[in-house]
């Protein structure tokens, strides 16, 4: 099969694990008390990074038949990586790594990889047709450290050579994984070993590209003199050699080895503030492969690689830190004096909206986060919290009768804990409110513990906030509202979630233009919600103006979700169509327009549970059908 006809551009073979990163920066690993969970493992990181840069990538590995294995598989799939050859091993656990950030030079880590799933990759897990379906096969040093994985990798390489698939070798030297150090010294990068040098050198003749840091070149070349090591590698292999040099960038040696390192094809790195070196080399290689596999030349490949390394080294995680092509192009367009910090606002926003799993672009949600309205309704019929909780559970049952992609919800945790728990993890779009109902200026239910409260939510939960915002309010009131929303936005970013900003200007019925004005003013205040939730407007020109404002300020906004405000469905449906035709409408989140009449009858005990579920399902489905 010709290279340009192959369905894949890269197969990454080897480590796929879970990284548990200590969240306390600057302390010992012994003293870290909370950890963030990420996808990890050198080939899995590279697969993620390459996919984010637009390459067609597959992962060849094994995971355990347990929660962490499912996490690894789901994360890879969410990144667009082909997981058809991520095999489930029923006898072994998924590998784990515990990592910390002490300072710019110290990154303690412990590998929990004793007989782990990805170290059981077998030739039975793949065939020549799979390897031949890709332009390149990536193998890494760790998977040559045991006899069984060494055999599997060599068979994969043999298939690649027969198929014209390029072989990329990331030396990926971890002395602890070769049994050269105590298990508590996972961060140690280099220990000389003639045994390992000889072993690695037996791989080099089969490679088309060899990539490593200076320490990794030293182990592969059997010398701590970099030029001597490079020449030893060249004597064994015709492969292009890519030397990763950290802050100094990289040097490439397609042919003979010169007398000086800099005399290779050298591309200087980007000045950047180091936050976490772990994963930066994987980002580098993902960037390099983007250029190399698309035949963009050595210089462009090196620019991509150094840019990716600079972005990853300034962030906390490994795989999640990999940049999108949009981020990378933004960095490459910056002047040479640009200095990146891990908390840079521009790149933080770009990373959140362009990297990883995209925000849902179509939202069909039943909103029943109403707290005040339900309390009043229950009181009217002499009912209380137990009855409210039961009714909200019935609403969740109604959604469960529909497919997950067409049945999202906004649910509070005051009366909706059970439906929240039941619907979480089902693939539905779920949001939960943070505002004190009716508060002006805006206040949050958790008070000053908003970040703490949101940190305890499942990561899939969207933060929803309703604000009564008037662009004509006195300056002091607007500033208070905007300050509260900034606090929310910071909490959203810190917890790695998305958010929905619902804006209802107090006078919008009299002045519908206030809706667009509010959106524009809030953008100018530095607020960038994932979705807006806005009233159903009656005029196409108003929707067109909102679309213009959103695209002007944030071309990555996932769109506008329309709210109902208890309007009858017959009145609401034509307005939904206006929102959709504007091109900015992403769907709806409607509550009382759908369930109010059923709620009145249920609390009055004139409608039973089953009939309530059927009525809500029918009306909700009708709105979905009207929108679609």
Image (cartoon, grey):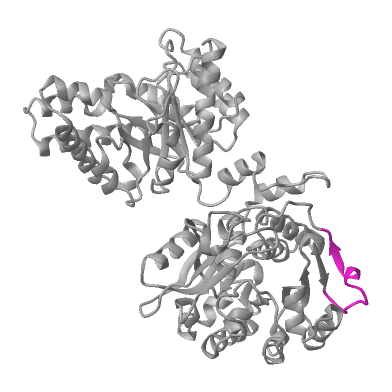
Q: Nearer the viewer, residue 253 or 577?
A: 253
Q: x, y (%) of residue 247?
A: 78, 60
Q: Which residues are magenta?
A: 254-268
Question: Who's the residue at 54% across and 91% down the image?
Answer: 147
Question: Who's the residue at 45% across and 43% down the image?
Answer: 360
Which quadrant of the figure has residue 131? bottom right
Question: Who's the residue at 58% across and 85% down the image?
Answer: 179
Q: Nearer the viewer, residue 219 or 293?
A: 219
In-image side of 52 versus 575 (left or right): right
**Is 235 covered by the magenta stretch?**
no
Identify the residue at the far right of this view.
Answer: 259
Residue 34 in the image: above or below residue 578:
below
Q: Report whether residue 159 is seen.
A: no
Q: Nearer the viewer, residue 225 or 305?
A: 225
- Main secondary structure found in the magenta portion: loop
Q: x, y (%) of residue 622?
A: 27, 33
Question: Who's the residue at 60% across and 35% down the image?
Answer: 555
In-image side of 305 versus 532 (left or right): right
In-image side of 456 versus 384 (left or right): right
Q: Quadrant of the N terminus?
A: bottom right
Residue 291 in the image: above or below residue 200:
above
Which quadrant of the figure has residue 507? top left
Q: Report whether residue 600 is seen.
A: yes
**Is 255 covered by the magenta stretch?**
yes
Q: x, y (%) of residue 528?
A: 55, 33
Which quadrant of the figure has residue 194? bottom right
Q: x, y (%) of residue 77?
A: 47, 60
């Amino acid at each position: 099969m010709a290279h340009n006809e192959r369905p894949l551009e890269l197969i990454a073979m080897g480590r796929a694990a879970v990284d548990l990163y200590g969240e306390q920066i600057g302390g010992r690993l012994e003293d870290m008390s909370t950890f963030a969970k990420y996808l990890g493992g050198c080939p899995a990181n590279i697969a993620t990074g390459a996919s984010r840069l637009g390459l067609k990538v597959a992962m060849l590995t094994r995971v355990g038949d347990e929660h962490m294995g499912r996490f690894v598989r789901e994360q890879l799939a969410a990144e667009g990586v082909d997981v058809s050859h991520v095999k489930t091993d029923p006898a072994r656990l998924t590998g784990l790594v515990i990592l910390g950030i002490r300072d710019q030079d110290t990154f303690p880590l412990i590998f929990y990889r004793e007989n782990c799933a990805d170290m059981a990759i077998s030739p039975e897990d793949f065939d020549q047709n799979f390897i031949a379906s890709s332009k390149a096969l990536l193998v890494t040093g760790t998977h040559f450290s045991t006899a069984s994985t060494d055999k599997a990798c060599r068979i994969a390489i043999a298939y690649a050579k027969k198929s014209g698939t390029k072989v990329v070798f990331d030396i990926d030297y971890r002395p602890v994984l070769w049994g050269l150090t105590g298990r508590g010294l996972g961060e140690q990068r280099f220990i000389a070993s003639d045994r390992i040098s000889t072993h690695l050198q037996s791989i080099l003749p089969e490679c088309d590209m060899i990539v490593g840091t200076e320490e990794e070149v030293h182990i592969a070349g059997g010398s701590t003199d970099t030029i001597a090591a490079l020449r030893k590698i060249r004597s064994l292999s015709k492969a292009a050699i890519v030397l990763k040099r950290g802050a100094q960038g990289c040097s490439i040696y397609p042919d003979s080895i010169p007398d000086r390192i800099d005399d290779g094809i050298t591309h200087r790195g980007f000045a950047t503030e180091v936050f976490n070196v772990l994963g930066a080399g994987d980002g580098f290689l993902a960037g390099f492969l983007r250029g190399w596999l698309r035949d963009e030349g050595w210089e462009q490949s090196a620019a991509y690689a150094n840019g990716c390394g600079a972005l990853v080294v300034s962030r906390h995680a490994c795989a999640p830190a990999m940049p999108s092509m949009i981020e990378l192009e933004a960095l490459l367009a910056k002047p040479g004096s640009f200095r990146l910090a891990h908390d840079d606002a521009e790149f933080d926003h770009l990373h959140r909206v362009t990297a990883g799993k995209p925000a849902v672009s179509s939202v069909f949600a039943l909103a029943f986060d109403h707290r005040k309205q339900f309390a009043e309704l229950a009181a009217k019929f002499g009912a209380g919290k137990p009855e409210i909780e039961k009714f909200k559970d019935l609403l969740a049952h109604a959604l469960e009768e529909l497919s997950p992609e067409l049945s999202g919800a906004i649910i509070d945790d005051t009366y909706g804990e059970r439906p929240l728990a039941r619907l979480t993890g089902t693939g539905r779009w779920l949001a939960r409110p943070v505002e004190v109902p009716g508060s002006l200026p805006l206040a949050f239910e958790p008070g000053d513990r908003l970040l703490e409260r949101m940190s305890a939510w499942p990561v899939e939960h969207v933060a929803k906030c309703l604000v009564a915002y008037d662009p004509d309010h006195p300056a002091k009131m607007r500033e208070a509202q905007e300050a509260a929303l900034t606090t929310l936005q910071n909490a959203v970013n810190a917890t790695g979630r998305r958010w929905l900003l619902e804006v209802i200007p107090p006078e919008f019925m009299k002045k519908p233009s206030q809706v667009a004005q509010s959106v524009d003013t809030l953008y100018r205040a530095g607020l960038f919600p994932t979705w807006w939730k806005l009233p159903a407007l009656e005029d196409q020109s108003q929707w067109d103006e909102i679309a213009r404002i959103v695209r002007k300020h944030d071309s990555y906004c996932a769109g506008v979700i329309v709210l109902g405000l208890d309007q009858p469905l017959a009145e609401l449906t034509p307005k939904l169509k206006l929102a959709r035709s504007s091109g900015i409408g992403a769907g709806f989140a409607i509550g009382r327009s759908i369930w109010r009449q059923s709620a009145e009858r249920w609390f009055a005990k004139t409608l039973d549970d089953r009939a309530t579920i059927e009525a809500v399902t029918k009306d909700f489905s009708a709105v979905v059908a009207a929108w679609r």
